[in-house]
Image (cartoon, helix red, strand yellow):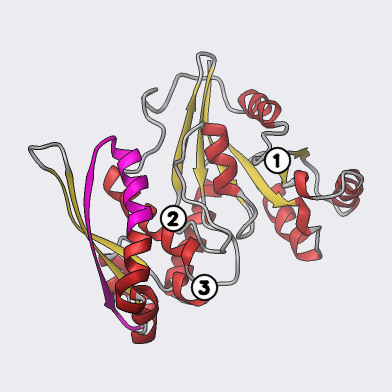
Amino acid sequence: MRSGFIGVIGKANAGKSTLINVLVGEKVSIVSPKPQTTREAIMGVLTKPEYQLVFVDTPGIYKSQNKLSDIMQKSAQTAANDVDFILFVHDGHGGISDDDIALMKKYTVGKTPMAIAYTKIDIMPKERIPEDVKKLYENGVDCDVLPVSARKFTNIAKLEAYLADKVPKGEKVIPEDMVTDKSERFMVSEIMREKILLKFGQEVPHGIAIAVNVFEKQENGVYDINLDIICEKPNHKSILIGKQGAAIKEVSSFARKDMEKLLGCKVFLTTYVKVKEDWRNRPNLLKDFGYSD
């Protein structure tokens, strides 16, 4: 039996969450085309008779812009320090820059062994893959490189087998019926944030937090969920609500359907939009919304 923690790190939008969801076989992390989708470390657990792989999904690595992003970057670094193996996820479709190489080398020189998941190979010329791998080796990135496509499931089984061989020998560290360490209440808030990320433009979603006020299962089996959507500016509130409330109704409807899939029962969802100016730089509000060191 082998069992261990695998820190999944890389730049924002490299496809870390999508890859973990595919490996685990269930959606444990929300996904969107926008950077900063993942805000804190989330565990995804894959348990097989011969091994257990505990993936730690981390916020994307990028330049900090506020106190929230400072916390996110610390979360990624902590995960890299506290795991048995590092899987660095790189968007192969985006090419390889000097910054990419420098970031990879930062982790290869540490004590934790590492490999690179070279992702999104389904949307790039195949002949570029060996060229990029050669470039990495020539520039001192000394670790295995595994080309994969999560969307097309290409080489996913090979990646799983590779990682199972890299974690230490030992018994399961997580109960085998668990696929994530996060509560249903947390997952509900993430579902709401995901739908906002998918619907609205670039500026508004990054300034969004979700505060779940009520999360209760009634005697009739229906979940009563009441939550606040926190934004930073009055004009953001207007965008989120939309004309005659059309936007918030639409995004809430999409969220409710996914919440019902998660919980396995009907959901009565109530949403409010509130403004908390510059909340991403206010420690007391960050703590209230579940973000802290």
Q: Which residues are magenta?
A: 253-277
Which structural element holds mark 3?
A: loop
Front-most of residues 85 and 68: 68
Q: What amino acid does circle 1 point to?
A: Ser
On the image, numbered disc 1 is attached to which residue?
Answer: 149
Counting residues from the start of the chain, the first of labels 1 and 3 encountered is: 1
Front-most of residues 216 and 41: 216
On the image, numbered disc 2 is attached to which residue?
Answer: 40
Which label was assigned to residue 201?
A: 3
Q: Nearer the viewer, mark 1 or mark 2?
A: 1
Decide whether residue 67 is among the magenta residues: no
Q: Is residue 225 left or right of residue 39?
A: left
Write the residue at 33% across / 59% down.
252
Residues at circles 2 and 3 in contact by the CB criterion of under 8 Å: no
Write the residue at 17% across / 42% down.
222
On the question of residue 292 being in view, the answer is no
Q: What amino acid does circle 2 point to?
A: Glu
Counting residues from the start of the chain, the first of labels 2 and 3 encountered is: 2
Q: Residue 256, image x and y in percent?
A: 31, 51
Disc 1 from disc 2: Cα separation: 24 Å
Write the residue at 15% across / 36% down.
221
Front-most of residues 254 and 136: 254
Decide whether residue 271 is among the magenta residues: yes
Q: What amino acid does circle 3 point to?
A: Gly
Q: Is residue 46 left or right of residue 90?
A: left
